[in-house]
Amino acid sequence: MNQVPVIEANALNLTFETNDGPVHALRDVSLAINKGDFVSFIGPSGCGKTTFLRVIADLEQPTGGQVSVNGMSPEEARKARAYGYVFQAAGLYPWRTIAGNIRLPLEIMGYSKAEQRERSERVLKLVELSGFGGKYPWQLSGGMQQRASIARALAFDADILLMDEPFGALDEIVRDRLNEELLNLWKRTQKTICFVTHSIPEAVFLSTKIVVMSPRPGRITDVIDSPLPLERPLDIRDTPEFIEVAHRVRDGLRAGHGDDV
């Protein structure tokens, strides 16, 4: 991996003001994510994983500290289309075909019809959905819909992919298959991926780096550089090396609970 930070957070804080008083979503979060990293964020519900992703994407504004994306502010990075975002739900428009959904951001950005078609066909092939562009979302399984959502995020070829627990609602068999596909996609495209999950096995299987977060206020309790090889068949989860990393993640989650204030 090239040790070139593409996302940097320094002493990042975010406090939401609510009717019941302030909610401290993030506290003193400092992190560097290098080009080509696959970084998973794991922690209990409400620990700030998604909030951190939303700060990177300029969907939330920090109340303290700094964050940069490709050396720019999140707002500048958003306007430069530096990232694609995949949400928990596929969020496909039911009245548009799969190819039509993928073309939508390209239409908004003013790409020509020929370019839209070429890019749509290319990303459908990347996510193994060639031949399904003319289908409607309701004609596809949940796993296929999420692959279409990933294709849409890849369509304008941003270097960074932000993924907010995209496989959380899927059954384990489908999830395993999509984890394998996502790893292969990452190796082929060399994107930088930030991935939110609640699953320890998923985080360990996918990542070059695992960021363990505490309950609110969200803090980083551990950053684990994975010792696992980049080639990872599913049965790597039975190896002592995998189990050791999973134990460290679990210990970090327990430590975060112990530090809760």
Image (spheres, rainbow, N blue to C red):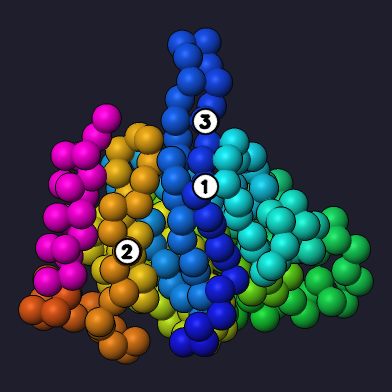
Q: Would you say residue 127 is visible in this rendering? A: no
For residue 12, which numbered disc appears in the image? Answer: 1
Q: Position of residue 81 (x, y in %)?
A: 75, 63
Q: Nearer the viewer, residue 205 or 22?
A: 22
Q: Position of residue 34 (x, y in %)?
A: 51, 75
Q: Nearer the viewer, residue 32 or 65?
A: 65
- For image coordinates 46% across by 56% down, the residue present is 30
The mark closer to the camera, 1 or 2, is: 1
Where is mark 3, residue-wise? 15
Instruction: Tell me the CA gap for discs 1 and 2.
Output: 16 Å
At numbered mark 1, what does the secondary structure look like: helix, strand or loop?
strand
Q: Which range of residues does the magenta coloring cover?
A: 244-261
Q: Amino acid at mark 2?
A: Val
Instruction: Tell me the CA gap for discs 1 and 3.
Output: 10 Å
Q: Amino acid at mark 3?
A: Thr
The magenta stretch spans residue 224: no
Q: Please state, as top left, top right, bottom left or bottom right, where the C terminus lies in the image.
A: top left
- For image coordinates 74% across by 52% down, the residue present is 75
Task: Choose top left, top right, bottom left or bottom right for residue 226.
Answer: bottom left
Where is mark 2, residue-wise? 223
At numbered mark 3, what does the secondary structure look like: helix, strand or loop?
strand
